[in-house]
């Protein structure tokens, strides 16, 4: 790809962006995990973003030009949503979005599906560890999932005082 096409910026998303954010989630999820049941209409998904995520989360988007290609919703030590359109994955966009969340939180938890090997590898590369696996009976897709956890390591400080020996 041409460098001009791959330059992206992170923007704060508002109510006007919720339809596009929901569409990114839907497209990324169903292209990568086609076996999942399609439980909600696009309108219901947009309403979830608008009525639940927007008032309770920081929502950022990755834009290339005027096109939104990735989105993250996070807050209260949780990543609720993180999706990048499949044609724009492996370009550092997900890492950049995740980095924004890691800058603001000292610990993070998130769920992903056990069979989502790509997402699991992505989170593990970024220092997340699997904390719990479930049979999926508690999620609406009834798909086995895994809880990931990350925490900021304490900063090392060097004592640069001369020793008194």
Image: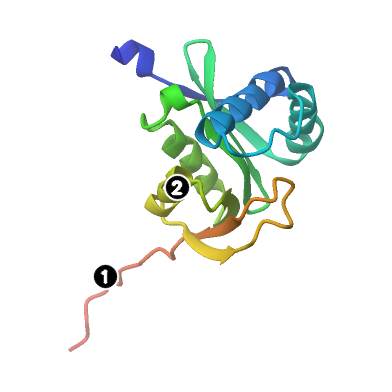
Q: Are circles 2 and 1 on residues that touch, CB within 8 Å?
A: no
- Tell me residue 160's x, y (percent): 26, 70
Q: Is mark 2 on a helix, strand or loop?
A: helix
| Left or right, residue 112 beside residue 152 | right
Left or right, 112 with reference to 18: left
Q: Estimate the spatial distance between the alpha carbons at disc 2 and disc 1, rounded to whole Å.
A: 45 Å
Q: Nearer the viewer, residue 71 or 151?
A: 71
User: Which residue: 63% across, 62% down?
Assistant: 134
* The quadrant where residue 156 appears: bottom left
Structure colour scheme: rainbow
Q: Which of marks 2 and 1 is in front?
A: 2
Judge whether residue 71 can be spotted in this image.
Answer: no
The mark found on residue 160 in the picture is: 1
Residue in the foreground of this view, choosing between 63 and 122: 122
Q: Which percent across, then down, holds residue 37?
A: 68, 37
**Label whose residue precedes the other's in the sequence (2 or 1):** 2
Q: Name, please, the residue furthest toward the bottom.
A: 165
Label count reads 2
Residue 76 locus on image (x, y percent): 68, 52
Indicate the quadrant containing the C terminus: top left, top right, bottom left or bottom right: bottom left
Where does the N terminus fall, quadrant-wise? top left
Q: Is residue 113 above or below residue 155?
A: above
Q: Which mark is residue 4?
A: none
Give the class, few, some or many, for how many residues have Cα within 10 Å of label 1's Cα (few <14, many ≥20): few
- Tell whether 79 sits left or right of 102: right
Residue occupied by mark 2: 117
């Amino acid at each position: 790809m041409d460098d001009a096409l791959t330059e992206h910026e992170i923007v704060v998303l508002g109510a006007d962006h919720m339809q596009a954010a929901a569409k990114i989630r839907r497209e990324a999820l169903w292209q990568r995990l086609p076996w999942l049941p399609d439980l909600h209409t696009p309108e219901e998904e947009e309403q979830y973003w608008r009525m639940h995520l927007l008032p309770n989360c920081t929502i950022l988007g990755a834009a290339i030009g005027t096109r939104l290609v990735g989105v993250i919703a996070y807050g209260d030590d949780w990543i609720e949503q993180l999706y990048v359109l499949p044609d724009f994955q492996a370009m550092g966009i997900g890492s950049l979005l995740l980095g924004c969340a890691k800058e603001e939180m000292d610990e993070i938890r998130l769920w992903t599906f056990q069979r989502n090997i790509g997402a699991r590898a992505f989170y593990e590369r970024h220092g997340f560890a699997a904390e719990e696996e479930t049979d999926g009976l508690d999620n609406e897709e009834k798909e086995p999932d895994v809880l990931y956890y990350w925490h900021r390591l304490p900063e090392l400080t060097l004592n640069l005082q001369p020793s008194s020996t």
